[in-house]
Image (tube, helix red, strand yellow):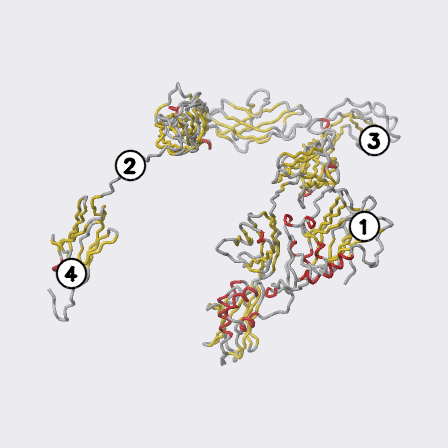
Amino acid sequence: VKEPQKAVSPDPAVVEPKPEEPKETPSAPTESSAADTSGTASDDSLDNKPIFLFVLLGLPESHQPDTRQDLTGLFTERPQSGEVNVGENITFVARVCGESLLKKPTVKWFKGKWMDLASKSGKHLQLKEHYDRNTKVYTFEMHIIAAKANFAGAYRCEVSSRDKFDSCNFDLAVHEARTTDGFDIRTAFRHAGEDSGELDFSALLKKRAVHVSTEPEVDAWEILQKSSPSEYEKIAFQYGITDLRGMLKRLKKMKKEKKKSAAFLRKLDPAYQVEKAHKIKLQIEVANPDAEVKWLKNGQEIHLTGRYIFESVGNKRFLTINNCALADDAAYTCMIGEEKTVTELFVKEPPVLIVRNLEDQMVMKGERAEFECDVSEEGAQVKWEKDGVELTRDESFKYRFKKDGCKHVLIINDVTKEDCGHYRVKTNGGQSLAELMVQGKYLNLDIADLTVKAKDQAVFKCEVSDENVKGIWYKNGVEVKPDARTHITHIGRIHKLTIDDVKPEDEGDYTFVPEGYAFNLSAKLNFLDPPKIHLDCMGRTAESTILVVAGNKLRLDVPITGDPAPTVVWTKGEKVLTDSDGRVHVESTKGHCIFTIEGAERQDEGVYSVIVRNPAGEDTADINVKVGEDSCIVQWDPPLFDGGQPVIGYVLERKKKKSYRWMRLNFDPYKETTYEAKRMIEGVAYEMRIYAVNAIGMSRPSAASQPFVPVAPTSEPTGLCVDDISDTTISLKWRAPERIGSAELEGYGVEYCKEGSDEWIPAFKGLTDRTSVIIRDLPTGEKMQFRVRAYNMAGPSPPATLQQAVTIREIMQRPKIWVPRNLHQTLIKKVGETINLVIPFQGKPRPQVTWTKNDEPLDPKQVSIRNSNTDTILFIRRSERKDSGNYDVQVQIENVEDRASVNIQIVDLPGPPQNLKAIDVWGFNVALEWKPPKDNGNCDITGYTIQKADKKTMEWYTVFEQYRRTNCVVSDLIMGNEYVFRVYAMNMVGLSPEPCLSKDSAYIQKTGIVYKPPSYKERDFSEVPKFTHPLMSRSVIAGYNATLSCSVRGIPKPKITWYKNKMDITNEAKYRMFSNQGVLTLEIRKPCPFDGGVYMCKAINSSGEDVVECKLEVRRKYIQPPCGQIQV
């Protein structure tokens, strides 16, 4: 056993390192020794008894967890979360300073939310404490010995001393010390009673580990052979055998005696088993090495494929099946001539594992509890247990089992205290355990995490089910006190903590602790700092323009801020720039985002946008980049005096106008007097000067030239296309050039020429500022070409030309009406509202539009129609009921037309209901009845509003609203009062303007008056007999019984009489009469030809009579004549 390990913080940045303390030797028992001894002494009794978690409401006052939540920071050292391997030891230490305490503090250790660990001291858990008189520090230790996997979870340490209280949460993670290699599904289940006498924390686990056994391999088939048939199903589930029918076949074959074979020296085994996705090899030995064998699967011959491989080695024959699937679970046969050997192959599915474990549930009495888990296979079988007893469906539907794919749910209805306990789900590959706790005292807390930005308001709202419950707010364990920015309110069931002008220091965990309850609810306040780009100037102004000479590196370094760190995206237009663009490099560091272009080119010129985002928002900045590559041509005259030596060349320099630094353009003497200076930035003013060079040296510089500005033409216009065309005109449109340059755009020039000609003709004089133009007076039917050029002070840009010539001729466009989506259904408007329908259409030349209503022309005084080239408008300023109807619109070009319909419904308030009257008065109730209104307002009546009024006061009170029937019962009326009633009709517009008043009042009689029920006339239910199904004429063969049937109705029950040829046959023995529920049957026993005739059935009662008849034909039997005779 290893030495106990101190639990250390998982994050060294949070907990400051402390010097290692010397380990103390075990001393004599202190004040806590009695508790330790008692815990050890009761270890055996504790392990042999179940552990119950009592509901907080039912605990004695001395055993309830301390609910005082005055967190005053008593800990000088808090227990830290730790990790340990299975079987190892770990120690958690808490220290409390006792200088300011009048008495020894009380410390409690908890597992999860409820379990007090003081009662669980024993083999695996020991609690110790000691007091250092020199430093006046109390030290409390919790030792966990030989940790198990189910010890993992959340723990809590609470310390209290009179009115002071402190609490600390920490976690324990337990790692498995072994791997699950060689896992066998047949050993996945373990008995719950194993390792008895040890501390069991499984009731408090949030996550359960799957217990896997490493017992030696067991042959399930040997167990099945030795077991009785009643245990087959249980053993099959335990060892993962899913094909029960195949299992029984295999057991039957295994019990048969083996017969000797002349063709086989060794036959196949009765059965084979293989895991899914594994390989298996079937082997036989033949007597004749040259014999040919044939392999079959379920009677079908197996052919050589990639998965099926045949091998022959001497007398041995092999069939190898690779990558076995469930479809390979079948019967396999090997045949040599007529002899064969058969085996069964069982493909074992992988164990069903529990992917998501059960979680502990706490519910209130009478509510429904649900346990959910996810398994690794759909449709897998699971077993549910409570405290070791399997759960099944019963008649009371207490337990319901739900299966949805991989999810399995146990539903417990109407939970009671008896349902508390441990619930376990089992598969053939694992199990999971959780606890159900039922709380009698109902208290519901609801609080949510908040994420706020700087200077915003944060509001924590906690809703408690009991409005009388008070509580305290804490931030990171310290009580929150109200101040100028922090406000605490309690109104009804709502507790609020409001923080104004949120700052970074407000971030943390906020907890609401209700008084009188040993639990709390926490929420986290997350602080977000919106991203911000810090640039002195942004946009497309001159100050935000960055100039770079072509060929040089462009580097944009932009400072940014934001918490959390924002993501950065660089774009140019709609294109996102990344490192994959070759010359482009994008880099983000803390507080900066850097964008670099190696070797800037003219095409790199434009507006670059940088976008920074985080959950708090985003910020954007535009940076205008200009690449200078313009040039100028410089000319000069030679010097008047060469200094006695010939001039061998010239040296040129230039500078920006506002600069004092001259830059040399050439280092070797240039012999010509004309020079082209390149790499100049467009729009920037420059000056030039020249030196003359001879054999002696350089002359003084010439006077600086006049300042000049390089200007270049714009790029060509973009998107040139034909907008419209007719017999003599054409409409063109385009977009502005992508690059305009530093010079102002003066306008556009448009030219055209005939196809095949080079003579371009201006479409109009001068330039136009617009990006669209209509060219008129063009020759009809001629093919023309068009182009557009942009002009600035540097001259025209390259032209933008149509891709192909255009024929000047109007193109007919078929008329088509585009009905808006909202007009596909009936348009409902109220009376007095304005109707404005815009129906777009297409068609060239301009179509003729016609409107009709219900196939009649529209009234121009009521309806206005306005038409354009692309749409038609129907306008009604004040709609009336008569404007309802079906409106048809037709667009027509010559003989081609299109139609559309719009249905308009004008609705109004309904009229009052009719004939309201009280049809009955009894007790304190009045039955009312009325009829629907004559005028429903051109829409359906949605309900009625019924009101009552005492005749003394005539104050109206509403009894029913939105009542749909035309009769009702008004109850709870006052005895001795007389009431009148009125009813309003309601439709989608509203209530009817006028109600319908009851004609008579209803008086509620006082007690003691005898109620005389009204007399009703007794109804006469008598009915004349009537045959509902007549007799049908028949033709039967002599010697076979025949029946005649009919049905009759009548009240009272009619008397039935049968006649043959109008002779009563009631008492004839040859006939039998039946009557069943009005169905009458006459049976004629073995009729002869003399029984044919007219049969009649007569029904008679006190109200009248009815008769029905039919004909019966009896034919002789057909007799086969003897051979040789001729029957005529």
Residue to which mark 4 is pinned: 1069
Q: Nearer the viewer, residue 467 or 674?
A: 467
Percent x, y for residue 899?
39, 30
Q: Earlier in the sequence, mark 3 or mark 4?
A: 3
Task: Examine the image and state in which quarter residue 937 appears.
Answer: top left
Q: Amino acid at mark 1?
A: Tyr
Task: Examine the image and state in which quarter residue 1116 appears.
Answer: bottom left
Q: Earlier in the sequence, mark 3 or mark 1?
A: 1
Q: Count neighbours of disc 3 (C-alpha within 10 A) and say few if under 14, some if 14 to 19, many if 20 or more.
A: some
Q: Nearer the viewer, residue 485 or 780?
A: 485
Front disc: 4 or 2: 2
Front disc: 3 or 1: 1
Query: Helix, strand or loop at disc 1?
Result: strand
Task: Examine the image and state in which quarter residue 888 appears.
Answer: top left
Residue to which mark 2 is pinned: 1016
Query: Helix, strand or loop at disc 4?
Result: loop
Percent x, y for residue 993?
42, 23
Q: CA distance from mark 4 to mark 2?
A: 50 Å
Q: Earlier in the sequence, mark 2 or mark 1?
A: 1
Residue 138: numbered disc: 1
Front disc: 3 or 2: 2
Residue, x 74% and y 35% (percent of image)? 559
The answer to whether 1039 is drawn above or below residue 904 in the figure is below
Q: Amino acid at mark 3?
A: Ile
Q: CA distance from mark 4 to mark 1?
A: 117 Å
Q: CA distance from mark 3 to mark 1?
A: 100 Å
Q: CA distance from mark 3 to mark 4?
A: 158 Å
Percent x, y for residue 611?
68, 36
